[in-house]
Image (cartoon, rainbow, N blue to C red):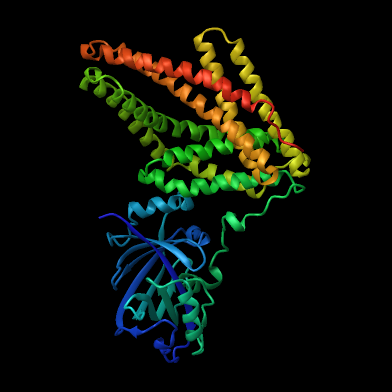
Amino acid sequence: MGTTGKLETEQKFDAETSSALPDLLEIEGVDDVAEPVTDQLEAVYFDTASLALAARRLTLRRRTGGADAGWHLKLPAGTDQREEIHAPLGQPETVPDELSAYVQVFTRGEELVPVARLSTRRTTYRLYGPLGEHLADFADDQVHAEALQPSGPALEWREWELELVHGPREFLAAAAETLTSTGAAQASYPSKLARTFGDAWPAEISPRTGKSRKKLRKKGPAADVVTAYLDARIEDYIAHDPGVRLGTPDSVHKMRSATRRARSALATYRKLFKRSAVRELQAELKWLGQILGPARDAEVMLERLRQHVLELPEEQQSGSLNQMIELELVAAHDAGYRNVLETLRTDRYFRLLGSLEDFRDHPPAKPRAFRPARKMTAKLVNKTAKRVERSRKAVKRSAGRTDRDTALHEVRKNAKRLRHAGESVMEIHGKRAAKLTKSAGRLQTVLGDHQDSVMATALLRRLAATPDRPADTDLGFESLLAMEERIARKTEKKARKVGKKLRGLRLRS
């Protein structure tokens, strides 16, 4: 039995032990209150010795008793909301793999250990609306808690929880008015676990995304552009790391994309920072990209050739042809993916995440990094655009097919860097940056198809040269190679047209 998840929306209130329960029927919208149900809940919370999960406001527990006994992982999901992921009870001291996968990007090699034990006597009242809809659950909790690591004194308190079921968010405000009228107050701690630790509760490590991220200013320091872009990539890693570990489709691609974007930013803006720091981080990002590449490349190639085989005449779609392609690429994907999983468990990977965060929080900036962002970024992004033009001219000078393919691949890489550079400054340069980004992205896409054709051709030729291969694959390989040749010519021609539209596009300082 696997994990299940839900979005939890709730509010907590501090209540005195002697406080009388409020009249729940006085809450606006409540038409009926079911008979109360009392449960004894026993929960052990897990974290690292440094409380790495608590610092991110994640909670991981194993709870017995009540209707939802099992392992629970709660992740922040907005004001008064958390995503809750469940797994079966399993073993008391062994965190299920499917939950461990979600937190390794935060624990980074540290062991998960019991850090707190809570015993709660909970009385739950179901609240219903006039049409019988289950609006919310009101819980009256008597809590006994003990911090285990770091150890602390046993605590006891009473609190009320109101969790939405099918009611609208506005219901919480209406209910709060009734509940606080009895003398209860909005909870002074965000969770039972935070109250258990008290002063030992760690300061929050908050992602600077969305509204919480500092707004970039045209006259603000150019370094802010880079740190904001890297911050977004760090959040990409945090978002997609669990998916890679769990085998979620497209997650390797998204992590690889985050790696390329981070490398592009460092390449474009390298002159703003100390050379050694940039080189070290670029080298580690390149290493991770090389680890992620084989699995993703095999996945892309398999999808491509499967589609192309379907386009062959029926008499050329032999089972032997399909089998040769499938065996080659599935094996390559699986070997690559195993290597990815092994890498994501290494200290080197975790150090890379820490290095990205350290670069973001304490950028090794040179004085020029504090010059006005609009002027400085225009200069550096335009320099990247000129690099694309130089590489396009190199294609014309290339001699022979192999040299031309290599030169076109270089154009693709430079267009990709320009696309990422444009992304990083759209908040400052607006429509012109958006246009530059779009044009660079089109060139990258066209040449990406060309490069895939080059790689497919090499693979097909190697397979076609396999000794003692089945004779019924001859026509299939011949047709697939001809198809890739046509695609290569078509994409090369299209790239020339798309590249002309990019020529001359520049940012204004």
Residue 158 placement (x, y as % from top left)? 44, 83
Picture layout, residue 274 above or below residue 44: above
Q: Is residue 157 visible?
A: no
Judge from the rendering whether residue 430 lies leftward or rightward of residue 342; answer left or right.
right
Residue 311 placement (x, y as % from top left)? 31, 23
Residue 239 placement (x, y as % from top left)? 47, 49
Task: Residue 66: name its quadrant.
Answer: bottom left
Q: Quadrant of the C terminus?
A: top right
Q: Is residue 500 visible?
A: yes
Picture layout, residue 144 above or below residue 481: below
- View extreme (top): residue: 399
- Is 389 or 102 nearer to us in this picture? 389
Task: Residue 367: name its quadrant.
Answer: top right
What residue lies at 53% left-to-right and 21% top-to-bottom? 494
Judge from the rendering whether residue 331 lies leftward or rightward of residue 285; answer left or right.
left
In this rendering, the count of numbered labels is 0
Picture layout, residue 284 above or below residue 412: below
What residue lies at 74% left-to-right and 43% top-to-bottom? 373
Residue 65 placement (x, y as % from top left)? 29, 73
- Is 293 or 372 nearer to us in this picture? 372
- Is 11 or 66 nearer to us in this picture? 11
What residue lies at 32% left-to-right and 55% top-to-bottom? 96
Judge from the rendering whether residue 457 lies leftward or rightward of residue 362; answer left or right.
left
Judge from the rendering whether residue 191 lies leftward or rightward of residue 362; answer left or right.
left
Q: Quadrant of the N terminus?
A: bottom left
